[in-house]
Image (spheres, rainbow, N blue to C red):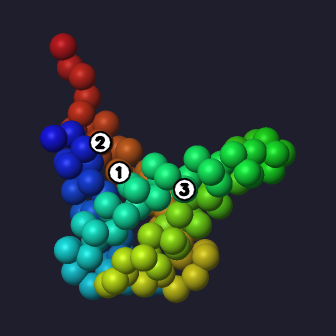
Amino acid sequence: MKTIIKLLITALVAFLLSRILNGVHVADFTSAVIFAIVLGLLNLIVRPILSLFSLPITILTLGLFSLVINAVIVLLAAHFTTGIKVDGFWWAFIFSIALSIITSILESLLFSNKN
């Protein structure tokens, strides 16, 4: 259940960010949900491979290259999803940073372990 809620949060944030950022276009909420699923699968399968191959440059840049990997994953997810269009790398870069920050904040608010 927690995974489904996280996917819906990602989809909602992606949908709302597309209304704010001019370079990211999401047709409807259904496309955003499919985008969130594809993004999750790519983060599960492709991201570890990219992180392994880019480990030396990630170390040299003190981890900042992982932001580039995030942008590439967003571009791949947009490529595989109909109804989503990202106008370029820099829009994907900005979108991925905003998506990561906002979803992290919302998930920490929703899933905080208050005992």
Can residue 29 be seen here? The reply is yes
In the image: residue 64, left or right of residue 75: right
Q: CA distance from mark 1 to mark 2?
A: 6 Å
Mark 3 vs 1, N-terminal side: 3
Asked whether, in this view, residue 38 is left or right of residue 89, the answer is left
Q: Decide which of tag 2 and tag 3 comes sooner along the chain.
A: 3
Q: Secondary structure at mark 3?
A: helix
Label 2, secondary structure: give it.
helix
* Structural crowding at the residue carrying mark 3, measured as other residues with C-alpha within 10 Å and reported as few (<14), some (14–19) or many (≥20): some
| Relative depth, front residue between 34 and 100 | 34
Q: Which quadrant of the rendered structure holds the C terminus? A: top left
Q: Where does label 3 land, which residue? A: 46
Q: Position of residue 93 (x, y in %)?
A: 57, 67
> Picture coordinates of residue 114 (x, y %)?
21, 20
Residue identifier under label 2? 107
Numbered disc total: 3
Quadrant of the drawing holding the N terminus: top left
* Image coords of residue 11 (percent x, y): 27, 63
Label 1 secondary element: helix
Measure the alpha-carbon separation of dots 3 and 1: 20 Å
The amino acid type, in three-letter code, at marker 1 is Thr
Q: Are marks 1 and 2 in contact (CB under 8 Å)?
A: yes
Q: Amino acid at mark 2?
A: Glu
Q: Is residue 76 above or below residue 10?
A: below
Q: Residue at x 53, y 63 (%)?
A: 73
Q: What residue did someone put label 1 on?
A: 103
Give the class, few, some or many, for how many residues have Cα within 10 Å of label 1's Cα (few <14, many ≥20).
some
Q: Residue at x 52, y 73 (%)?
A: 75
Instruction: Give me the C-alpha separation between circle 2 and circle 3.
Output: 23 Å
Q: Which of the two discs, 3 and 1, sits closer to the camera?
A: 3
Residue 69's disc is none
